[in-house]
Amino acid sequence: MLEQLRKVGDYVRKNWRSTADDSYREYKHGRERERKQAERKRQDAERFAERKRGKAEREREYEERYAAERAAEEPQPEAPRDDTSKPE
């Protein structure tokens, strides 16, 4: 029984000490947090670039499509007709 209590006490003291700001555990968690933040920033930048490319592509397609429609709607200049009703 005393052996178990000593083991529990040692375990608690060891973990209590390892939560100090300068402990390896804190260092490791800090590094992991920094890594995850960097990964999130990279993913956000990729998503932003993808959205920007998609928007530019949609705008280009829109311009191409509606430029063709506008060109089709514009009245075509007709060739001048020979008006035979005018006296020469």
Image (spheres, helix red, strand yellow):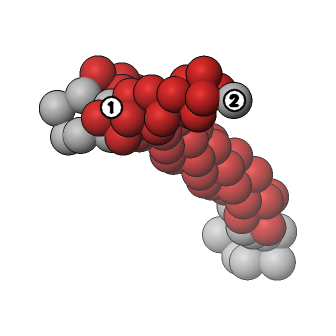
For image coordinates 29% across by 35% down, the residue present is 17
How far apart marks 1 and 2 lie (CA) works out to 26 Å
Mark 1 and mark 2 lie on one chain; the one further toward the N terminus is 2
Q: Which mark is residue 1?
A: 2
For image coordinates 20% across by 40% down, the residue present is 21
Query: Is the residue 38 above or below the residue 28 in the image?
Result: below
Is disc 2 placed on a helix, strand or loop?
loop
Query: Is the residue 53 above or below the residue 87 in the image?
Result: above
Task: Judge left or right: residue 69 versus residue 50.
Answer: right
Query: Is the residue 20 above or below the residue 1 in the image?
Result: below
**Residue closest to the eye, 1 or 66:** 1
Q: Label 1, on which residue? A: 18
* Callout 1 touching callout 2 (CB < 8 Å): no
- Quarter of image, res 19: top left
Q: Split into 4 quadrants, where in the image is the N terminus?
A: top right
For image coordinates 29% across by 21% down, the residue present is 24
**Residue closest to the eye, 12 or 54:** 12
Q: Which mark is residue 87?
A: none
The amino acid sitting under disc 1 is Ser
Task: Judge left or right: residue 74 versus residue 32.
Answer: right
Question: Looking at the picture, how far across and down is residue 66, in whole percent?
Answer: 72, 59
